[in-house]
């Protein structure tokens, strides 16, 4: 016959397997992926340190619901802007005083990340 330990082990295993079932009884909402084309900055753009910068993107194919929060991140730097609505199509923010001058690019994050063309950042003087 079976020992008490074996019976408990089998019961524990059956409960564990039942809880780990791949059957999802609640239908999950489809996640929308929005990867808009970045309009600005483009390869002719120069941001001036300390002044307002504009990032704009095409919203013509934006889904009704965007799952993740939005942010603009400068390559090798911290986020420059966050918490805006991707359906707005643009965001402005001051260019930080401690960013690297020269060629740069941004990543626009929503449900997916995409990169801008390389553009310039220059000092005011």
Image: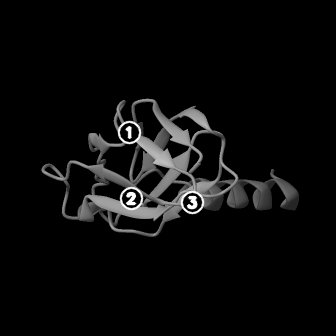
User: Hey, which quadrant is residue 39 in on the image?
Assistant: top left
Figure disc tally = 3
Q: Nearer the viewer, residue 28 or 60?
A: 60
The residue that label 2 is drawn on is 24
Q: Is residue 88 left or right of residue 106?
A: left
User: Hey, which quadrant is residue 86 in on the image?
Assistant: bottom left
Neighbour class for label 1 at 10 Å: few (<14), some, many (≥20)?
A: some
3 or 1: tag closer to the N-terminus = 1
The span from disc 3 to disc 1 (Cα, nearest Å) is 15 Å
Q: Nearer the viewer, residue 12 or 64?
A: 64
Residue at screen point 26% across, 40% down: 37
Q: Secondary structure at mark 1?
A: loop
User: Hey, which quadrant is residue 9 in on the image?
Assistant: bottom right
The single residue placed furthest to the left in the displayed view is: 60
1 or 2: tag closer to the N-terminus = 2
Q: Is residue 88 above or below residue 106?
A: below
Q: Measured from the top left, where is residue 123 in percent x and y?
A: 59, 46
Q: Is residue 27 left or right of residue 22?
A: left
Q: Secondary structure at mark 2?
A: loop
């Amino acid at each position: 016959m079976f020992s008490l330990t074996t019976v408990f082990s089998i019961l524990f295993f059956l409960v564990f397997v039942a809880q780990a079932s791949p059957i999802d009884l609640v239908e999950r909402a489809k996640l929308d992926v929005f990867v808009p084309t970045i309009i600005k900055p483009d390869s002719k753009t120069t941001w001036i340190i300390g002044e307002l910068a504009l990032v704009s993107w095409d919203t013509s194919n934006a889904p009704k619901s965007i799952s993740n929060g939005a942010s603009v991140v400068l390559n090798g730097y911290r986020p420059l802007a966050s918490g805006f609505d991707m359906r707005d199509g643009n965001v402005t923010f001051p260019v930080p005083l401690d960013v690297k001058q020269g060629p740069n690019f941004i990543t626009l994050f929503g449900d997916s990340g995409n990169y801008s063309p390389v553009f310039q950042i220059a000092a005011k003087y």
